[in-house]
Amino acid sequence: MEMNNKRKNCRPRKISRRGFIQGTALGLASLAIPVGSADASVWEAFFQKHFREMNDDEKKAVIKRMEKEYSERYGRDLTIKTTNAEPGVLFGYGLDLSRCIGCRRCVYACVRENNQSRDPQIHWISVLEFEKGEKWINDLEGSDKYYNPDEVPEDGFFYMPVQCQQCENPPCVRACPTQATWKEPDGIVVIDYNWCIGCRYCMAACPYGARRFNWGHPRIARSELNTETHYLGNRPRSVGVVEKCTFCIQRTRGENGRYPACVEICPVGARKFGNLLDPDSEIRYIIENKRVFRLKEDLNTFPKFYYFFAT
Amino acid sequence: MVYIFKNFFITWKQILKGDKWYYAWLGFLSIFIVLGIAAYVQQVNRGMIETAMRDQVSWGFYISNFTFLVGVAAAAVYLVVPAYVYNFKPIKEIVLFGELLAVTAIIMCILFILVDMGRPERVWHLLPIVGAMNFPRSLLAWDVIVLNGYLAINLIISFYVLYRTAHDKEYNMQIIKPLIIISIPWAISIHTVTAFLYNGLPSRPFWNAAVLAPRFIASALCSGPALMLIIFQIIRKVSRIDIDNRAIHKIGELIAYAMGVNLFLFAAEFFKEFYSGSVHLAPMKYLYFGLHGHANLVPWMWPALLFNITAFFLFLLPKTREHPFGLNLACILVITGVYIEKGMGLIVPGFIPGTLGEIYEYTPTMLEKVITVGIWAGGAMIYTFLLKFAMPIHTGELRFVSEASEKTE
Amino acid sequence: MYMRPILILAFLVVTGGFFGSAIADDGIPRFFVPPPPFSEGIFPCSQCHEGMPANHERRELSFHSEIDESFNHAKEQRWCLDCHNANDRDKLRSVSGQLITFEESYFLCGQCHGTIFRDWKAGVHGKRTGEWNGKRTYRLCVHCHNPHSPRFKPLKPLPPPLKPNEIQHRKLNDDEIPLNPIGDIR
């Protein structure tokens, strides 16, 4: 494989002058201050409280408004859950590096489940390809995210998917100036997309490159919208806010909590998930019986995402 | 009450009336301001996808300029210390213009933060009580406090002094002395907190070095005063204000010391990274030699270093710093050098290589440059207005009216 | 397909020695698995093999030639009737001669692959779907590994992400929004 070819000089395109003028005109129009009664929801959205400061009635009202907005935007009805964390649950994740073949099924199952923007493209999972032998995963610079052979695994390479590590000591939460991101009692680090100001300090703080910013207006084909959503999880986002993996909070929370989408799609069964507080859980078995490590342990972030070797 | 309106009118008249050069200057700035606003509207409309920032390099030109300007603002203290504490007369007379520069720089900082926000309309979420300020955990919350506090302190001091002078009254040292005393550590704090903002991120080894805050302050004490030296010479030209050469040369000498410290700290950092040669060397290598064939900043960093070293000697030697050419050359070299080093040279390598090893070479788009120039032009206009108002008060040409003053006439 | 958990709870309650657990009376757990992935019409094997005399001699097969050709599972040491039961072809047999149904073929595989069997029972080897805290579906070894050639086959990877400079503002109509390479996952 030609390594030199992999990293081309990434220089962004310049905008054309005409596009610039068009955009300016459109932008001026969009800046018009909403005054009519039809725009009442714009003001409601503007003055919306922080999610954790809303009482149940306020949450209900907000969700009703949002469901209406989303159905207008996508032409489909969707539901927004606010399921709380279950007591006695602390989610943990295991990823078997001896099994992962780098097929990227998880990347796109995640996109589908979590309503990531298709254009501009947003992926929550990055799969890194490392050359076997010489150096270990500390050599991140030697890894490649853009590999594209006909078949994987490629001889002489191994793969490491990276997503939000759901740190017990999350640097992103500390960084956020508005408390728009926080760690829930079940250990999931979530974002209130309606409270985030888009300063991206959390992205600078995250040691795992897990956070994504909506650089443009996110777009999803109507037919592909996942209508089963959670307020803190996969509900559609808007421009200018940060998002990231939430362990599929809309699936995993509740009485019949399901596995995250990436776990279920993985064709080699490399992805494991469960309750760290349950001694009989799969994740506990892994931690107790396998060789596990956590990414960048030296930073004391205490991820709840364990890489392991089953063999 | 009548006098407040009258004085308000006097202020506006003073700001809006000028000769053709004044209008030409304002017109010149307005072009860039209007372009900047148009570009910003485009950015709001389409999102920050119009910038070259991406998830891999999530801060860029805006934050670089912000960082540089925090340094400029902090440098007002360089004049305040000798002026008020040691009562060094020549500097005391011009300290007001330093404070006004600090005010301008902070306003520009705030503008750079605003244009960098994905959701500027939610800026109120940052506030305590109405919002949910993450204080004291988030260093960004600290920065909001110290920057706005610094803005307030400098506004109060300079406008109080101007107000009293405009009424032909001596200002009361009892009132401003505590503020001046506070402003000194506060100036240090704005740059320290801004440094800590980057410094406290273990994810970014380039910033996660203890030398960062001291280096920030050392370099700020170079660029800020250098900018002031140039402005003082302009003031001397366009107004009747006499700025003593002794003050100018003293400031030049002080810049030399600050630059000496800055260069020493840089050398310490450079040595540590290259001699130990750990994986954390990568960003430094990227800056000065290029990394895996990516070397966009290399042609900027070496000249910046060269500029700083040259300026150090120009300021250090009495012969060159007391010569107008040597002095101004040194000022320009310092401003350029520090602008590169404390701007793009500080922010971008925090993200190169990225936390997952990816290298994305960031070069600002035209839109980012237009917005940036727009803010600089806006800052220049604000400072022009402040000077237009403050200079004649300082020289005694402009006075407010009051009951007492009308009686005497 | 595999998204639907197969409920054979009744079976477990009848055979289970412990309340609610998936442990059978022989101390070996039984699991929710989908039916074995037979080729269309191949099972029951007795359809053809009924009355056919068992020939233990290693030879080239004419009927199961495609398996014979691709066979690559310790092929020096092993042949068909080491795992397939000669007398009742609808069953498998362990080394000790115990008969094993195709629904429980993991007991057969587990004879040699003990550590993997152990991991599989713990839910650590292989794919699981369903509920992390409740009903979940395991897979038989043969759902992912061809028993006659068990090495996992390489796959075509899904497309790499766009590079940062390829992500730009584009004017798109609704029907031009790129579709996800993975369609329905629910």
Image (cartoon, rainbow, N blue to C red):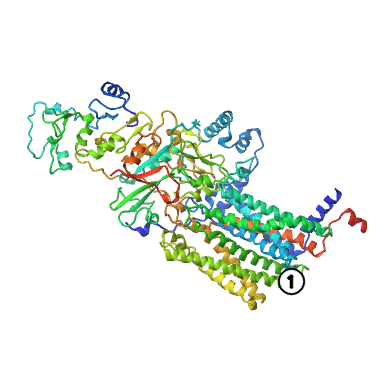
Q: How many marks?
A: 1
Q: Is residue A21 left or right of residue A91?
A: right
Residue B33 in the image: x percent, y percent? 65, 56
Above/below status of B37 relative to C129: below
Q: Is residue A183 left or right of residue B232?
A: left
Above/below status of B210 relative to C45: below
Could you say whether the residue bearing mark 1 is in a helix, strand or loop? loop
Residue B6 in the image: x percent, y percent? 84, 52
Q: Which of the 4 image quarters holds residue A93?
A: top left
Q: Which of the 4 image quarters holds residue B99?
A: bottom right
What subunit carries mark 1?
A: B
Give the residue number, with chain letter if any, for mark 1. B244
Position of the C terminus of chain B by quadrant:
bottom right
Say what amino acid the circle numbered 1 marks. Answer: Asp
Q: Is residue A210 left or right of residue A134?
A: right
A68 and B309: which is toward the camera? B309
Residue B168 in the image: x percent, y percent? 84, 60
Residue B16 visible in image? no
C170 and B163: which is toward the camera? B163
Residue drawn at x 58%, y 28% as measured from the top left: A57
Residue drawn at x 46%, y 60% as measured from the top left: B283
Residue drawn at x 35%, y 58% as measured from the top left: A3
